[in-house]
Image: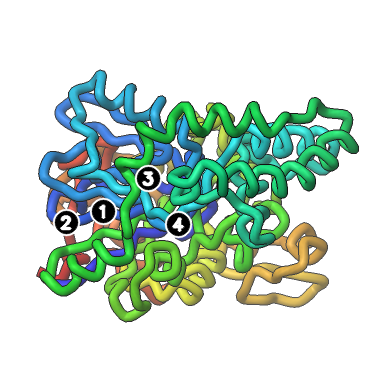
Amino acid sequence: MRNVAVIGSQWGDEGKGKIVDWLSSRADVVVRFQGGHNAGHTLVIDGVEYKLSLMPSGIVRPGKMSLIGNGVVVDPFAFFREMEILQEKGVEIMPDNLRIAENANLILPVHQAVDKALEAARGKGLIGTTGRGIGPTYEDKVARRGIRLCDLAYPEYLREKLERLMIHHNALLKGLGADVFTIEDLYDGLMGIADRLLPFKGVVWKILDGAISDKKKILFEGAQGTMLDVDHGTYPYVTSSNTVAAQAATGSGIGAGSVGYVLGITKAYTTRVGAGPFPTEQDNPTGELLGQRGREFGTVTGRKRRCGWFDAVQVRQASAISGIGGFALTKLDILDAFDEIRICVAYELNGKQIDYLPSSPVEQAALTPVYETLPGWTSETSGMRSWDAFPQNAVRYIRRIEELTGVRVALVSTSPERDDTILIEDPFGE
């Protein structure tokens, strides 16, 4: 038995929600370790759809402990909105089954204002932020001026921190021509929810340490994807946190050796939301068909996703950086309609062939994908639950992905339904 960390191996939107839900039914503890309320995890359980942005996916399952780790930035107002929506669907949420790390940084309304003002000021150079204040909150965290959950228990200390915080943000907002905030606006807002929020405060690293000692199964739930990592992604078109598997340790407060098996959620083709390089993008009828069949619209933003062929170079790189032990391959059935399927096996850059995604945005923009073409299977795979029933060409496609990336496929998802999942290798090692 081992713990499992789930991460996206592409640019997010790989289908992590369903896989995490499938795994969480067997885990004892589910913990979010990075990002904010910009995750878009959709779960379908007994015909009921749940859309989670901040809550760990284990929250919809009775008897599971859900944790929001210190690596997450928490919008307390969004937290309560999401909680109320889930409670209306019969989900029980209380401090007995959900805790937020006491040292988690809080997203404030001023962070959202700064986020939107900065994005507007970029003009044509948009990064594609969701405008939810996540980036500015991480900036405050590393600049050592952030407001943390534990600060709400000490009102006078909180006020002092807000005074220091607003010296920075009001100067920035004024310079951008946006409305400034008063300290009272922020202080009163936080004090108005403190009594509701503080009961959820917990020492998450200690809870996890106890769970490890008790040999409980822990599922670490990542958001976004490896290519959106602030260090290893397509910078600057990235999120504001580390999305790689190593962040599961840092963002929850456990030793790196306790993370366990790394499961990379991997879509059978590639998508991306917003701006940034995308070597295999198909801005043509092929891309349109992938988007239509895959219903490629962002859960959080509602934005149309850009679609393209599977990029084995990029996924191999993500696998090496995160130490991925196995893939959960999703949305294979979307490829059922194609006579031929292409896989990117290398890039050409300035007349030379390379086998990695370079860090320079200039070089990324100059990449030309080198494709290998495989025959399609043009038959229905949606809803299949048996490996033996797969069309031969679908199996060949999966095997070729394994060969090109050096990682075995552990799970295959054949529809959004939880039970339409073929288990090849058990991530928990049971």
SS category of the residue bearing label 1: strand
Measured as percent of width and height from the top left, residue 339 is found at 43, 44
Q: Which of marks 4 and 3 is nearer the N terminus?
A: 3
Mark 1 or 3: in front is: 1
Residue identifier under label 1: 30
Between 286 and 74, the one lying in front of the other is 74
Q: Are marks 1 and 2 in contact (CB under 8 Å)?
A: yes
Residue receiving disc 3? 15
The residue at 24%/42% (across/down) is: 95
406 or 207, nearer to the observer? 207
| Label 1 – label 2 distance at C-alpha | 7 Å
- Residue 50 is drawn in which quadrant? top left
Q: For mark 2, what is the residue?
A: 27
Q: Measure how far apart labels 4 and 3 are at the Cα level.
A: 29 Å
- Mark in front: 4 vs 3: 4
Distance Cα–Cα, label 2 vs label 4 = 25 Å
Task: Check whether the beta carbons of the residues at disc 1 and disc 3 lie within 8 A of each other.
Answer: no
Percent x, y for residue 208? Answer: 25, 65
Query: Which amino acid type corresponds to the residue marked 1 in the rendered image?
Result: Val
First of labels 1, 3 by sequence position: 3
Image-based side of 224 in relation to 59, left or right = right
Disc 4 to disc 1, C-alpha distance: 18 Å
Of badges 2 and 4, the one in the foreground is 4
Residue contact between numbered discs 2 and 3, judged by CB atoms under 8 Å: no
